[in-house]
Amino acid sequence: MTVAADRPQSLAGLTGAGIDEERLALHLLTPFGAPWPLNDASMWKGVRALTPGHYLEISPDGAERLVSWWTPPEPEISLANGAVLVRDALEAAVAARNRKAQVISADFSGGMDSTSLCFLAARQSAELVTVHYEGSGSLNDDKLWADRCRSELPYARHLTVPRGTGPALYSPLSTAQLDLEGPVPLARPRARIEHVLRLAAEAGATRHMQGTGGDELFFATTTCLHSLSRQFPRRSIPHIRAAASRYRWNLFTTVRQFSAIKPYARWLDQSTERLTSQRVWGYETGWEPALHMPPWATEAAVSTARALIHEAAARSPEPFAPLPAQHEMIRAIQANGWIIRGLSRIAEQFGVLLEAPYTDDRVLESALSIRLEDRISTSHMKPVLAEAMRGLVPHVLDRQTKADGSTDFYEGLRRHRQELWALFEDSHLARLGLIDPEALRPILFGEHADARPFMPFDSTLGVELWLRSTSTCEGEM
């Protein structure tokens, strides 16, 4: 008989299943963990995850049947028509949250994603509370843009966490409450998220909206440009020139970036060849961001990850969509959904439901339906969202910057470096033979030009904390 639940740990608790330790190696991969379809597997032995875009039908005799209900649209709608679809989908997504709350709160960073949600919410019936978390550093201009837009929302309540008054990044790890579903890299911002949710709850909000997913839907990647170049070479030339200038590509690098991408199964299989190579930040093209294991992963961990990827590739999996750009977007939103589920566990303790309208299926569909050439602009960061919000959100076309949060990162690392190191001196991952703690010393105690090297560290930290949670919270399953 098939038994289903909304969380795998519920089934694992019923069956007494343990953790599939072999799969832990895949969660060390960055930036999004295991690639499709390996990311779809449960961390608990004997528990299977439902395939995305399908629902489970269970007959009276206990037999099961997977039924497909969703397929991605083709990217064939113009910007003008597609912007209407995006606006309608986002309005409906926000309205669905508003209808179920007398008071709704939302992040109000000053960026396009969260600001758009705030203005959509303000047009509807629920009372709106916005929360702006002031960042540190001269390169963080979020406050400037939040102040400009705040004056256009006079009937909302606006809360601000003044610079330097909230908890630092990587704040206390010992009290972390994590979802037992699987590892999620939430340790760096967890205390700040808790602080915002506490403020939202004190203001009477029962639902809190985040702009998670906006970047993945509306910021065109080089893979999107690659797919455009294969479909319409001439139309892509101005954008390729702009990308080459922005990333300082020479001719050889430019040609390499836009060479043919292999079919998905072959790409997946060959991705193992670069697991231990150094990441090239910002412009790797492929079905998904290139897979890398951190330098502190042991040979055993790398070999396990490589073997599991080879096995998955041998089964000839199909991508989510025929175009790499479409598959990449779906996969990124899927990863965001995983993060939101983990954050929801944190929100529950404050009596608040966490909401991420950009991850709704209808919003994703609307973004996927827009022509590739209309997703890319040499003058605007997010042309599709800007066009969709034109007339609804002030200054939406003005901002051409993205805030730099490195000052907050360095301050958090300075305060909690010793605590982080103590965690890995007694590492559960090390006991399982998956990491070498000494190899983490350079990342924790070295000097870094920016925070990017800590992306793999945060993934490893998420797995470490999750392992500790499973050993202390078995009664919750």
Image (cartoon, rainbow, N blue to C red):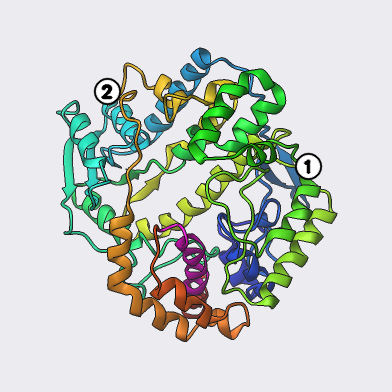
Q: As drawn, is 183 to the left or to the right of 327?
A: left
Residue corresponding to mark 1: 262
For residue 230, say whether it is visible.
yes
SS at mark 2?
loop
Which one is in front, 384 or 175? Answer: 384
What distance separates the C-alpha of mark 1 from that of mark 2?
43 Å
Is residue 452 within the magenta segment? yes
- 104 above or below 84? below
**Which stretch is magenta?**
451-466
Q: Is residue 359 visible to us here?
A: no
Q: How many marks?
A: 2
Query: How far across and down, in percent of the image, does residue 153 sit?
Result: 19, 28
Q: Are marks 1 and 2 in contact (CB under 8 Å)?
A: no
Taking the magenta stretch, the answer to whether it contains residue 372 is no
Tell me the kind of residue under disc 1: Lys
> Mark 2 belongs to which amino acid?
Pro
Task: Please state if 352 lies on the left or on the right of 216 as rendered.
Answer: left
- Res 394 label: 2
SS of the residue under disc 1: loop
Residue 187, compared with residue 59, is above or below; it is below
> Which image quadrant is residue 110 in?
top left
* Label 2 Cα neighbours within 10 Å, binned few <14 / some 14-19 / many ≥20: some
**Front tag of 1 and 2:** 1
What residue is rendered at 33% in x and 60% in y? Answer: 409
Q: Earlier in the sequence, mark 1 or mark 2?
A: 1
Residue 135 is situated, as x and y percent measured from the top left of the image, at: 24, 50
Coordinates of residue 336 in the picture (x, y in percent): 50, 48
Q: Quadrant of the N terminus?
A: bottom right
- Asked if residue 257 is positioned above or below residue 377 in the image, the reply reads below
Q: Residues within 10 Å of mark 1 (few under 14, many from 20)?
A: few
